[in-house]
Image: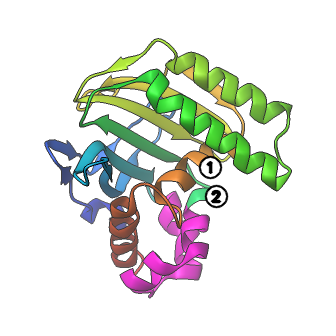
Amino acid sequence: MSESKRVTQMQVEDYVFPPMVKPPGSDKTFFLAGAGERGRSDIDGTYVKYTAIGVYLEDDAAIQALAPKWKGKTAAELTDSVEFIRDVITGPFEKFTQVTMIQPLTGHQYSVNMAKWFEDIWRSQGIFTDSEAKALQTYLEVFDDKKFSPGDSILFTQAPTGKFTIGFSKHDNIPKDGVAVIQNTTFPQQILISMIGENGVCPGARQTLAARMSELLK
């Protein structure tokens, strides 16, 4: 039996992330590696939760790729390891991220600041090419006229080949197909870095991913 069959669902606020899914843009099955909320403190100091995020990894392939190097590590060791998270993000297996709205949000609010942030990072690293510019432009166009209510989800499926599928749905109704496909490796990896990386916006997803993978890799 696949080790991932031991994975259970996770609940973040009102939203339950199932243990296994088939995301848009892929014919493979993915297991729930981690989940958490993204939030921030408002000007008056009140902490507001904006989105619930679930991170899924390709069944079997992710465990097989990560086990030789990370088997036997504790949850704390994996949580604190920048290298482990990088291996998850860049590993030779597919990843799927589901971002479900807790608060209403427009596509413009979600995409514009993120796109600018990514461009600034890539320019500083000297890796901002025509391919990245085209990817960002497509990304902004996809989100331009969108309005998300609580329970609406943004779906990101990324393959090692650089195929990056974007989709939209209600939380518990994941479609087979996406609405746009971007061919670029840098962009989808940066999406995951922004969520579960060292300074990512969803430390809960990073921590639960490390805890779950520690168990699965034993």
Is residue 161 something that shows in the picture? no
Image mark count: 2
Q: Are marks 2 and 1 in contact (CB under 8 Å)?
A: yes
The residue located at (38%, 37%) in the rendering is 22
User: In which quadrant will I find the N terminus?
Assistant: bottom left
The residue located at (33%, 62%) in the rendering is 204
The residue located at (46%, 44%) in the rendering is 96
Residue 189 numbered tag: 1
The residue located at (50%, 20%) in the rendering is 143
Check if residue 10 falls in the magenta segment.
no
Q: Closer to the N terminus: mark 2 or mark 1?
A: 2
The amino acid pointed to by label 1 is Gln
How many residues crowd mark 1 within 10 Å: few (<14), some (14–19), many (20+)?
Answer: many
Check if residue 70 falls in the magenta segment.
yes
What's the CA distance linking mark 2 and mark 1? 7 Å
Residue 90 numbered tag: 2
The span shown in magenta is: 61-88
Is residue 15 something that shows in the picture? yes
Percent x, y for residue 5? 29, 60
